[in-house]
Image (spheres, grey):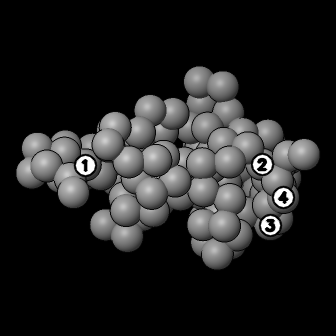
Amino acid sequence: MKSEYSVRVCSFLAAVALLGAATGQGQTSGSQKTLIGVVSDSMCGANHMAKDMPSAECLRMCVKKGTKYALVVGKDVYALEGHEADLDKYAAQKVNLTGTVNAQTVTVQSVTPVK
């Protein structure tokens, strides 16, 4: 079970992530690309904060609390829109993701695991 501190940290970081996403509105339309990265959430990015549970469980918990799925590609973290069932299926796994990239947001068109 998560400590109250972990829940507060998750809530704070969710607010920061939402604020960051809001400042990216109004960008020009993006281009379609295929990215290879690890499915995560916009709050944790590459480092899941709940050290007492597997990364996939932390990711799913954070998404249920309102953060977006994300793709970690090197040091970049892209917020993901669409295909939530596929993203949940590949939680914390390395995937090939195709979609329209607009700044740091990707509208997902397909997700497949990296073999």
Q: Secondary structure at mark 2?
A: strand
Q: Earlier in the sequence, mark 3 or mark 2?
A: 2
Tell me: residue 63, above or below residue 24.
below
What is the distance, in whole Å, between disc 4 and disc 1 at their CAs? 28 Å
Q: Secondary structure at mark 3?
A: strand
Q: Which residue is mark 2?
A: 95
Choose between 71 and 30: the one closer to the eye: 71
Given contact means CB atoms under 8 Å apart, are the residues at marks 3 and 1 in contact?
Answer: no
What is the distance, in whole Å, between disc 3 and disc 4 at their CAs? 10 Å
Q: Amino acid at mark 1?
A: Cys
Q: Amino acid at mark 4?
A: Thr
Q: Earlier in the sequence, mark 2 or mark 4?
A: 2
**Counting other residues with Cα less than 10 Å from the Cα at mark 3, is it few (<14), some (14-19), or many (20 or more)?**
some
Q: Is residue 25 visible?
A: no
- For the view shown, which residue lies furthest in the top direction? 75
Q: Earlier in the sequence, mark 3 or mark 1?
A: 1
Given contact means CB atoms under 8 Å apart, are the residues at marks 2 and 4 in contact?
Answer: yes
What is the distance, in whole Å, between disc 3 and disc 2 at their CAs? 13 Å
Q: Position of residue 105 (x, y in %)?
A: 60, 51
Q: Which residue is mark 4?
A: 112
Q: Which residue is mark 1?
A: 10
